[in-house]
Image (tube, grey):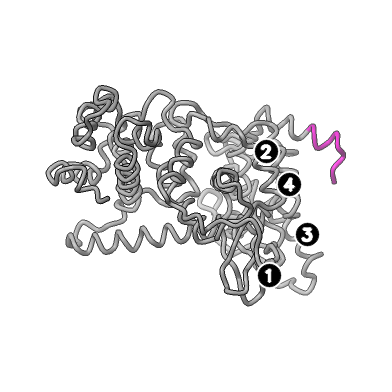
Amino acid sequence: MEMNELIDERTLDKIRKIARKRGISESQVISEAVKSLAASLYFDEVTDGQNIVEQMTPSQFVINQSRNYIDGKKAVALNKKILDEIIETESIASSSGTELMPGGFKLDEVLNNSLSSDVIALSSFKDNLDVEAKGATPQTHRDRSNMTRGLINMMHNKIFPAVFLTYSLDFCLKANEKTWISLDSFKDFAYRNAQIFLNILPEGSPNSDLKKGFQATENRLKRKLKPSWSKSRKAEELDIARKESKSRFLSNFVGYYRDSVNLYAGVFGEWELAELKVEKDGKEWIRLGRNGREAAKKFKNLGRHDFQTVKFDFTPAQVGWFLDNILGSFPLEEKAVRMMLAEGRFGTEGMRGTEVLTEKFYELQKAYLKKEAPGETEFIESLRGKMVKDKKTEQEKYNYVIPKNRAISTMSKLQELGLFSSWNGIYEITGPGKEVLELWKSRQLN
């Protein structure tokens, strides 16, 4: 059933206009207008249970599914259409800054709603694959160049998107009581729900920093458009940028199959969050991997957490999961983390923390690569970068561009986990960071 069969064209036009209005989240006037008009904009055709529906925002309706307020078939059709509107553009809740509802965003409800809206066909799930299905080998740091040997890929430098997607994979498999899902179908499911998640986190919310690592928001993409471009050129460039951002996010995190070498690349592959198999017809299937199964146990709180109003922090058990299950597969990254925790502080009033951190990181990387790639002395030395003149001392020194980027990437993960904080260019270990350090010492890890 088409949406225009349920709602008149005039109201549909209002819906589209609101969805196109971005960058107005700070306007309380618009926020209140959206709250008061939302029901009439989306639900003019609703009659049964009218008083209840009028108190719901569009996003609230979406995540509460079809609870017998209106005819069941119409509810499902309308629900799916509204979801499509929201993920293609910025959601009303995001653009206006209004909350969805008390306890607003609950991941379990959004995932369940997506499944009930026929986002994934039942044929996308299987209990068992063909006997001849070929299992892909997880890509490792050794399958990349010496520049990133021993390290987590810089494109994989955010932890939360990885566990968000792992939780989503576990949820949809359990909901359908199946073991496998097609890779392409899961990517569609993952992108849809990631988009909804981004749209309910306005700038300034306690969890707005969790957006990092996901696909770019519509507002961010729009800021890259040139004012001199025509309306059609802007629309074309925006569409291209949106597709590129989507592809980059899904490739980096959900991953992809490297047919020529039979490797599963991306976070899901390298972190062994998922396993991938290819059937004889070429179709690719995934299920939870060994580290994904552990993540599903450790991150059960994701489904019911109120991301709109309550700050999300990694629990000690979740931090331990990352250090024990993921970090150990990247030896240089693990050495760097140990060094950072042991040092505890980088930087002074006279020297920024990145300078001290970078030089120490390079020494670790140099020692590691000398063992791993003994014949690459010239390359190892080249990692120091070019000689540049220091603006303060006028002395020449190496700029360490590559080690600097790698060191900052590692430090950003420790900050995301709550083990380090930064202020005035100085990095300093936190209380939880000290506890992790003592734990490692007590276990006498090398």
Expressed as whole percent of the image width and height from the top left, the position of residue 94 reads 33, 38
Quarter of the view holding residue 332: bottom right
Numbered range of the magenta stretch:
438-446
Q: Could you tell whether 50 is left or right of 349 in the image?
A: left
Q: Secondary structure at mark 1?
A: strand
Give whichever of 223, 160 is nearer the camera. Answer: 160
Q: Earlier in the sequence, mark 1 or mark 2?
A: 1
Question: Identity of the amino acid at label 4?
Answer: Asn
Residue at position x 76%, y 54% in the image:
331
Mark closer to the chain start, 2 or 3: 2
Ranked by sequence position, the earlier of labels 1 and 4 is 1
Residue that numbered label 2 is attached to: 297
Which residue is label 1 attached to?
A: 134
x and y percent of residue 84 in the render?
Answer: 33, 49
Looking at the image, residue 178 lies above or below residue 45:
below
Say few, some or many: other residues with alpha carbon within 10 Å of mark 3 (under 14 / 14 to 19 / 20 or more). Answer: few
Which residue is under mark 4? 325
- Does residue 86 appear anywhere in the picture? yes
Nearer-N-terminus badge (2/4)? 2
* Whole-number angstrom distance, CA of label 1 to CA of label 2: 28 Å
Q: Which residue is mark 3?
A: 367
Give the distance between the C-alpha atoms of the residues marked 2 and 3, in whole angstroms.
Answer: 37 Å
Judge the density around disc 1: few (<14), some (14-19), many (≥20) Cα neighbours within 10 Å: some
The residue most toward the left is: 10
Residue type, label 3: Ala
Q: Secondary structure at mark 3?
A: helix
